[in-house]
Image (cartoon, rainbow, N blue to C red):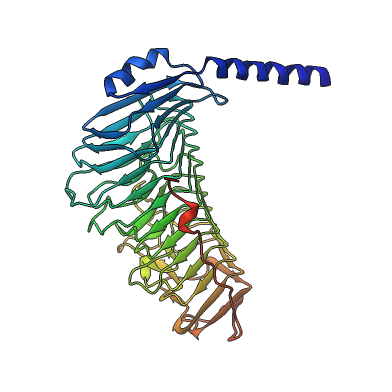
Amino acid sequence: MKLNLRLTVVMLSSQLLLIQARAAEIKISSPTQLTASHNSLQPGDTVLLKSGKWADVDLLFSGKGTKEAPIILKAEVPGQVVLTGKSHLRIAGEYLVVEGLHFQEPDTEVSDVIQFRGDSKTPSNHCRLTNCAMTSTGPQNADAECRWVGLYGQGNRLDHCRFEGKTGKGTTVVVWLNAKGDGRHQLDHNYFGPREKLGKNGGETIRVGDSKTSMMKAACVVERNIFEKCNGEAECISNKSCGNLYRENTFLEVQGTLTLRHGNGCVVEGNVFLGNNVNGTGGIRIIGEDHQVRGNYLEKLGGDKARAGICFMMGIPDSPLNRYFQVKRARVEKNVLVDCKQSFFIGLADDKNGILPPVGSVIRGNTIISPKRSLFAVSCSLTGLTFENNRCFGSELGMTAQPGLVMNPETKAAPLKGLSRAEVGPKW
């Protein structure tokens, strides 16, 4: 058995050495040259884009690498390949890596600037966009829908990138699911910078799924990103699928929320929300079944109702996919809320049809501190909620006393700072 294992390792090492020996470095100075190279690209090859401005280019990066030897498309000098105007990129294949590009002032006439697919029938798998940026400083057409990144297929990664200055309609980053589901993407260590209020739907920073596919399991991981002043709309992150994990992200003065809008069985864990008392800054909004919200830190949030620290929405009977499902079996545990305008709102209804309160849910082991304010706002029956071991200190509880809610002026919590700017975004 040991001999066979050793033989396998030797064979794999030999294959890797052979790939490395064959790997080529190809310098490209035009989209035509990139397209012409596709048939010859082999696992381990690197394509270098010449430094300079690339205006209105259609870049198709196509190939099939391997896990051990991906095919790489990178800037000759990180950050010095600047794509402007109607430039857009399609990453089409498997085990492809794109790094070091800077998309600057993308034209809103381009509906999708970067897509992880070749076309509507060929999504990409196990590809990566890293160390890139997309920024805008000028005015954008508020009516033209322009999405900056679209993730298709499965197992792709978006990391160490910077997205800043989007003002027009269209989600910054979208995860798209198909009839098979797909997903399992990873979005980590990105910096999402200021985004102005759009004034209508379509201003999300990240959306995972959509209404039609919301009952599919996406199993995406969104972790260790910074969201700063991402104020496009009420939903900074809009979850619209099942089984996703939102972990250890930092939200700085975001006038919106991490919203579990559609789908079930998601986990929101270890995130830091710092509002600095800015009006409308929000926390976490819960809709649907079997969600877990645990170990998050929320401080000085200036929002209420849908932008409360933690908000439970009311459900609609026989809700269609695009409306509001009843909250069932939610677990809200070991969160810390400090000096928020409205720490908890339980029973917020979007309209008169929202009549189903949370059921089978637990609020356990949380620390809630707001000496000058009420801690809870309640507009529904609490019979479907269980409170256990929550430590509270506020001007008043804000509702009828419940077992498991202990008011104690000695309640304290250690502050958390969240991620630093140096931990996320491109390295150039």
Q: Residue at x 75, y 16 (%)?
A: 7
Percent x, y of residue 286:
45, 59
Looking at the figure, which quarter contains the N terminus? top right
* Vertical relation: 208 (above or below) 20: below
* Vertical relation: 327 (above or below) 189: below
Where, by quadrant of the figure, is residue 90 drawn?
top left
* Vertical relation: 338 (above or below) 273: below
Percent x, y of residue 2:
83, 21
Residue 244 visible from this viewpoint: yes
Looking at the figure, which quarter contains the C terminus? top left
Pick the front one: 62 or 181: 62
Where, by quadrant of the figure, is residue 51 drawn?
top left
Left/right of residue 196 with respect to residue 206 in the rendered view: left
Percent x, y of residue 204:
33, 51
Pick the front one: 402 or 372: 372
Residue 1 visible from this viewpoint: no
Residue lying farthest top? 40
* Vertical relation: 80 (above or below) 344: above
Pick the front one: 125 or 27: 27
Pick the front one: 92 or 342: 92
Percent x, y of residue 31:
28, 23
Total count of labels: 0
